[in-house]
């Protein structure tokens, strides 16, 4: 970015005329710049403190009993309680989001960018998606509770949705989170599709490809890094959301059943997830729960979420650099 | 990118292919000679003209309510190169893109009048634009190969049209040979097309268009992004393949039109009563020699002699 | 090559491919409609149960001191005041820090620094809110809040929760503001520098005013996010599933969102009967429409700044 720096201009203008004029320091300017820089440092600093605290608080558990912590279950005794059910719950929630929200969101983005005529319905759908993106996550919990969990009177159980999800289950939670991240998946996919150069589209149509062939063979491959970025970001979001899951009814007390990792029947069973498990522990009275165990669980959740986010952002920046370079 | 180096390597390649392609060149010369003879003959007896492939009658194209070009009447004849020239914005691309229904992709675009391809109304509701584009191939201003291998670029059209895989090798060889690219790339068919020079990319795009065995090739300023040497190669190539295809080319380069084409259509844009936007129209359409040596319309003469603004 | 007239069937294309096009279009259209179905389901379930609540509860209870849903006391003032406090405190933290960080990134940081700092900020935007809740309870409240407000509630209060929510929204404010600032054309900066203005003057009197609608949008969107944030207040607000009316932000407080989560999390049986359950939907309805209003306003404002450039 080549913004002419004011001092350069000054220098050019007064060169050789007045040294004192040129040398004058811009005190207010420097103070302002320092204040802006300080704000950024504070913002990043707070988050560094946060990371430091959870790591030091969680260190006892992570260093002495990491194995039993990862494989243990929700138990009343803090010393051998573990997060395996939370990990499994979050794993299944992410899986459901990947199977439901990703295809649905990408398909919707394809429709809006490639097929939709510019009419009232289309702009209504667009507006609706933007608004859905701003709906608080706890409100999605209401959706999950009313529609996916309860056989809601309004629907009179006609569609048997409650029967399918089996009540307060990972399936209900996963569908809720799918609805929650759907707008994000759609919007980021739309942006990625919009960035595909029209020359590529024309090349495809020019050799006699149908619209779908152009989309599947040229547009989606070209847009895939951008789409992947959006899906990774929304996966991270789904993994970290607690509020809607509380409403859907994750177990916040103690959970005895502990199915195997790949026992798919658990999607229709009682469950908990990492964020709700953390919320539960943080609000327990015992220090071992609310500090040691909670921090250790937080470290693991943050690790997962930051990994996903970093992958997404690195991917996007690579992609953008390649485009503009 | 180092332009100089690029130029010399292009030159080297063209020399190489010239060496081995002696026969082809003589053939082309003969073909050119015979076509001149044929057109001399036509001057005497109009009945000798090649059959019409594309017939436009009172063709107008709109973008929304804006009439971009109006009342075009022209016949494009088999195995000829038809050039479209005219100032910027007079609707050359618009007409070209309505021939293979690329304009269908612009939601506001609309065609009025009659446009027939081998006698079939191209805008008949029963006609499938996808099939039209397979029969009427297109080469664009900027080379736009797919970000895939050279091989896959060529086989893409046949693949989606349902051609069996077993024929792909033959199609690739035939198309690349016709596009005068085979010798340059036959050893790196699996490499990405994006690694080629601009001129090679454009010839690849021609090969890609040929691969679906079209009847007509539309070219919208195919050389405007290329250096003179690459341009020369494409022009030679057009002369060679016109025995098999009917070619319509839009160009801003009048020497190019004069060099390569058999017929030339001169378009211009004029203010169209109703609103003050300029609407394109076909001023004159005739044998290229006639357009450049003895045009019937003053506007054409002004343009071809460079007296146009 | 003899050119005969073709039949329309020559250009009709493959039935199978056309059928597939129709199917795909239908499928993706349904997917786009899914977003509308979700909205309808959200609004439907909210309003249906909220209506049940309004009709079955003694309306005087909605303005009765304290929020004790299980004892049929639903004082909205308690929730509204807590929500206002938390939101105001959050914005006092997030707006200056976020916008200043954005100004530094967009106007001062070297391209290299920005290339590292921006992604870091974006990664941090993904930190789950339960983590911020823990941080607010464990660090912000004892170390910051209670060191200068000794009688602030030690099990959590609105100030600690507000600061936590504020930290959570800093990256959001910074990123939207940065977008707005970098959308200001460089020509404006250059023009200002060209007449000898200092960087500070250029930033404050040229760039910020030019980006003002984007900055306002950032503020509104962040406010809406702060109002809707649940877990930080649930964990660090100090109130369990019920709260007395408190006007002092150093006291425990229950925002609308935290009240909803508490009703649900109070027992493992969410679907409990009675008014506590429908209160959840009633509060959810208010929350939904308040945030919707803010988002619509922000959307309008953003549109305006898109139009400007
Ligand atoms: N997609 C479009 N929507 C609206 N108007 C268009 C569109 N494409 C072209 N036009 C208008 O139609 C007219 C003809 O454009 P066209 O591109 O066909 O001209 P052209 O003769 O090919 O010009 P050039 O020599 O610059 O390529 C112009 O006025 C142009 O602005
Ligand atoms: Mg053109």
Image (tube, coloured by chain):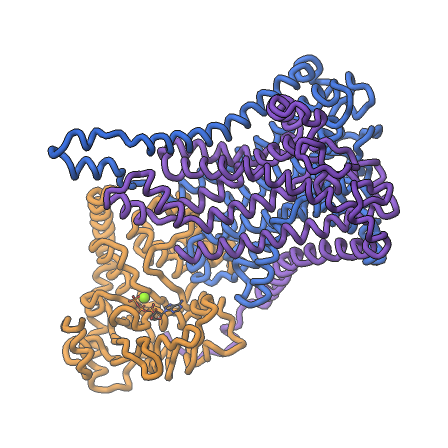
**Closer-to-camera residue (B260/C296):** C296
**Looking at the rendering, which quadrant does residue B66 occupy?**
bottom left
Q: Is residue A98 visible?
A: no
Left or right of A31, for residue A72: right
Q: Nearer the viewer, residue A215 or C93?
A: C93
Front residue (pair C60, B291): C60
C113 relative to B120, above or below: above
Position above or below: A142 against C160: below
On screen, residue C182 versus residue C88, left or right, reads: left
The residue at 75%/53% (across/down) is C46
Residue drawn at (42%, 51%), measured in percent from left and top? B146
- The image position of residue A160, as x and y in percent, is 83, 53
- Quadrant position of the C terminus of chain C in the picture: bottom left
Horizontal and vertical percent position of residue C82: 68, 40
Relative image position of residue A299 (x, y in whole percent)? 63, 24
Quadrant of the drawing holding the N terminus of chain C: bottom left
The chain coloured orange in the image? B
Picture residue at 34% right of the left edge, 68% below the top: B93
Instruction: Judge whether residue A81 can be spotted in this image.
Output: yes
Image position of A54 (left or right of B268): right
Which tint was used for chain C? purple
**Chain identity for the colour blue used in the image:** A
Q: Is residue A56 left or right of residue B78?
A: right
x and y percentages locating residue C300 in the rendered image: 52, 57
Which quadrant of the render holds ligand 1?
bottom left
Above or below, comparing residue A47 to residue B284 in the picture: above
């Amino acid at each position: 970015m080549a913004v002419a720096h004011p001092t350069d201009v000054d220098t050019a203008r007064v060169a050789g005329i007045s040294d004192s004029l040129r040398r004058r320091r811009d005190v207010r300017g420097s103070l302002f710049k320092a204040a802006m820089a300080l704000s950024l440092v504070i913002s990043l600093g707070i988050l560094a403190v946060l990371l430091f605290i959870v790591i030091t608080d969680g260190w006892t558990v992570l260093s002495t009993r990491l194995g039993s912590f990862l494989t243990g279950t929700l138990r009343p005794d803090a010393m051998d309680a573990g997060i395996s059910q939370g990990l499994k719950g979050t794993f299944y929630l992410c899986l459901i989001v990947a199977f439901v929200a990703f295809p649905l969101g990408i398909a919707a983005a394809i429709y809006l960018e490639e097929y939709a005529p510019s009419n009232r319905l289309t702009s209504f759908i667009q507006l609706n998606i933007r608004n859905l993106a701003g709906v608080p996550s706890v409100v999605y919990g209401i959706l999950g509770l009313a529609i996916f969990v309860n056989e809601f009177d309004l629907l009179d159980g006609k569609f048997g949705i409650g029967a399918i999800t089996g009540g307060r289950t990972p399936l209900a939670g996963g569908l809720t989170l799918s609805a929650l991240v759907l707008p994000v998946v759609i919007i980021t996919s739309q942006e990625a599709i919009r960035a595909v150069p029209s020359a590529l589209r024309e090349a495809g149509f020019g050799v006699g490809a149908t619209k779908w062939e152009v989309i599947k063979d040229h547009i989606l491959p070209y847009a895939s890094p951008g789409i992947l970025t959006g899906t990774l970001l929304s996966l991270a979001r789904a993994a970290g959301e607690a509020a809607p899951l509380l409403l859907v009814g994750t177990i916040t007390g103690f959970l005895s059943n502990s199915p195997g990792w790949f026992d798919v029947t658990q999607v229709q069973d009682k469950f908990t997830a990492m964020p709700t498990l953390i919320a539960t522990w943080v609000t327990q009275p015992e220090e071992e729960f609310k500090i040691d165990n909670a921090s250790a669980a937080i470290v693991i959740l943050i690790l997962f979420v930051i990994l996903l986010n970093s992958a997404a952002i690195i991917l996007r920046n690579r992609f953008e650099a390649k485009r503009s370079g | 990118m180092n332009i100089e180096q690029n130029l010399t390597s292009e030159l080297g390649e063209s020399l190489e292919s010239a060496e081995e392609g002696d026969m082809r060149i003589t053939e082309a010369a003969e073909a050119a000679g015979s076509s001149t003879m044929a057109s001399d003959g036509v001057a005497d007896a109009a009945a000798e003209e090649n059959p019409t492939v594309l017939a436009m009658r009172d063709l107008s194209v709109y973008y929304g309510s804006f009439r971009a070009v109006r009342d075009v009447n022209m016949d494009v004849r088999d195995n000829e190169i038809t050039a479209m020239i005219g100032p910027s914005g007079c609707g050359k691309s618009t007409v070209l893109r309505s021939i293979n229904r690329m304009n269908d992709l612009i939601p506001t675009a609309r065609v009025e009048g009659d446009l027939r391809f081998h006698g079939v109304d191209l805008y008949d509701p029963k006609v499938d634009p996808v099939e039209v584009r397979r029969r009427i191939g297109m080469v664009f201003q900027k080379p736009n190969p797919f970000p895939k291998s050279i091989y896959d670029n060529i086989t893409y059209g046949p693949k989606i049209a349902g051609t069996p895989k077993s024929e792909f090798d033959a199609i690739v060889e035939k198309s690349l040979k016709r596009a005068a690219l085979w010798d340059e790339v036959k050893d790196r068919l699996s490499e990405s097309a994006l690694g080629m020079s601009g001129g090679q990319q454009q010839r690849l795009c021609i090969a890609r268009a040929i691969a679906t065995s079209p009847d007509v090739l539309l070219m919208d300023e195919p050389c405007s992004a290329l250096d003179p040497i690459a341009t020369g190669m494409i022009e030679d190539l057009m002369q060679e393949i016109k025995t098999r295809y009917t070619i319509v080319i839009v160009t801003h380069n009048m020497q190019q039109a004069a060099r390569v084409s058999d017929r030339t259509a001169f378009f211009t844009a004029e203010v169209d009563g109703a609103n003050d936007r300029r609407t394109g129209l076909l001023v004159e359409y005739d044998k290229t020699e006639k357009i450049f040596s003895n045009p019937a319309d003053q506007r054409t003469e002004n343009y071809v002699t460079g007296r146009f603004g | 090559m003899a050119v005969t007239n073709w039949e329309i069937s020559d250009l009709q294309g493959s039935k199978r491919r056309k059928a597939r096009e129709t199917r795909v279009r239908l499928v993706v259209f349904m997917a786009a409609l899914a977003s509308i179905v979700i909205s309808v389901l959200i609004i439907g379930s909210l309003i249906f149960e909220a209506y049940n609540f309004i009709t079955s509860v003694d309306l005087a209870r909605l303005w009765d001191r304290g929020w004790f849903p299980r004892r049929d006391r639903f004082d909205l003032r308690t929730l509204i005041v807590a929500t206002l406090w938390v939101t105001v405190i959050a914005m006092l933290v997030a707006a200056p820090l976020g916008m200043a960080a954005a100004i530094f990134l967009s106007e001062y940081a070297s391209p290299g620094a920005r290339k590292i700092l921006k992604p870091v900020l974006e990664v941090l935007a993904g930190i789950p809110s339960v983590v911020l809740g823990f941080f607010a309870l464990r660090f912000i409240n004892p170390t910051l809040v209670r060191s200068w407000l000794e009688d602030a509630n030690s099990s959590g209060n609105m100030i600690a929760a507000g600061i936590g929510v504020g930290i959570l929204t800093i990256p959001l404010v910074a990123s939207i503001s940065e977008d707005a600032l970098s959308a200001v054309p460089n020509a404006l900066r250059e023009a200002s520098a060209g007449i000898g203005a200092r960087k500070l003057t250029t930033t404050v009197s040229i760039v910020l005013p030019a980006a003002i609608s984007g900055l306002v949008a950032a503020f509104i969107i962040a406010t809406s996010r702060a109002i809707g944030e649940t877990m930080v207040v649930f964990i660090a607000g100090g109130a369990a599933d019920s709260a007395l009316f408190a006007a002092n932000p150093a006291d425990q407080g229950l925002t609308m969102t935290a009240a909803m989560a508490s009703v649900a999390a109070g027992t493992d049986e969410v679907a409990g009967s009675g008014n506590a359950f429908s209160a959840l939907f009633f509060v959810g309805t208010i929350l939904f429409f308040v945030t919707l209003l803010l988002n619509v306003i922000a959307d309008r404002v953003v549109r305006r700044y898109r139009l400007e450039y």
